[in-house]
Image: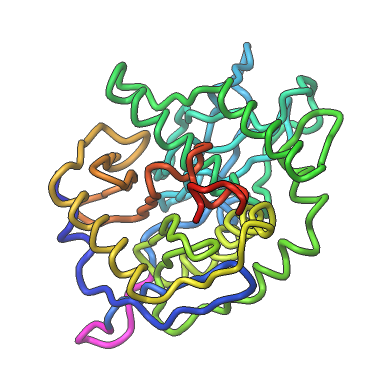
Amino acid sequence: MNIAHALENLDLGFPQTFRNLTVVPIVRRPRAGGEDEAPPYLTLEQATARELLFIRELPGAASVPELQAENRGDLPVLLVDGDQLVGAKQNRIINLTILVPPGKTIVIPVSCVEAGRWRVTSERFRPAEHTLYAQAKAEKLRHVSASLEASGRATSDQGAVWHSIREKMASMDAAAPTEAMADIYKRHEVSVEEYARAFPPVPGQVGAVFAINGYVAGLELFSHAPVFVAHFLKTLRGFGLDAVDAAGNGHGASDGRAARAFANEFLDAAATSARTFPGVGLGETVRIDKGDVIGAALVVEGKAVHVTGFRKDYGSGDSRVFQRRSDPRSA
């Protein structure tokens, strides 16, 4: 599927920089008819607060890589790739973006981000204020794409997820008894929130390109500005935690040219190398892998509901974001 047409009418705004994190807004051009239409779906937080969405362990026999999502409402519910669900037997993150159909119960693919707990703390999951940090999200995206290619299933490499969290804990001095990702955020809450609050959304913003230490790492894009704004703090915390981790490697800001080059490269990859698979729930999942970029999108009736993309080396040990400045490769 060529999803480039679903990403039309977008412009990049002026770069904003706080410490070593630069954010370049992606803004949708105003519609000729005036204000944008309301999203035809609810967010995870909206549906949970209204008691319309219930996410639980699988009935009968709980399974680490799967959960049950029941939508009792009249609108679809958007679950975003990398969002964290806390409670039940162990905290999980969502493996890919899903639109849960109204009035339906489906099984959703997830990954565990709390290796040391397997006991019930609540009957249902609740949404957390944090997403999977960007470094691990990029790595998981690669594994889920490979799984879809090999088996048609959106499974991650669970061992790699746990390994990434352990490495992040060691790097950021955030040991925790259950090896929960949430404890890394808690350990660095003050610094992460400073990043998260430093980038207020601009009018019409539907996405952003993110750079750490001058290195353009990735982008996030939603179909509707209110949905982007509702999710923006989570996304900023994900890149903010990585920025805190990489702060000792330099504080170079990224200009708009680098962000535009990345956005154009991603659009080219989306237009020429996208592979389409049946979605979990409504729509189709599109996976992107070309040159230096990887990505994923949920497309419903020709419209890109959510798009995420990264530099291919981001999340790996080869990424110069996380290399020490003494390393000659980071020069």
Residue found at the very far top of the displayed protein? 61
- 68, 169: nearer the viewer: 169
Closer-to-camera residue (214/328): 328
Quadrant into which the N terminus falls: top left
Which residue sits at x=37%, y=72%?
26
Q: Position of residue 160 (x, y in %)?
A: 56, 25
The percent position of residue 11, horizontal first and vertical second, equals 29, 77
Above/below status of 222 relative to 61: below
Side of 80 relative to 293 (left or right): right
Secondary structure mostly seen in magenta is loop
Residue at image position (77%, 30%) is 179
61 in the magenta segment: no
* 89 versus 188 height, above or below: above
Q: Position of residue 72 (x, y in %)?
A: 51, 43
Q: In the rendered image of this protein, does residue 34 appear above or below residue 147?
A: below
Given residues 252 and 139, the one toward you in this image is 252
Q: Residue at x 18, y 55 (%)?
A: 268
Coloring applied to the structure: rainbow
Answer with left or right where residue 86 lies relative to residue 27.
right
Name the residue located 79 percent from the left edge and 25 percent from the top edge: 120
Membership of 36 in magenta stretch: yes
Q: Which residues are magenta?
A: 30-38
The count of marks equals 0
- Horizontal side, residue 322 vs residue 271: left or right: right
**Location of residue 283 (image quadrant):** top left
Residue 213 at x, y = what percent?
55, 63
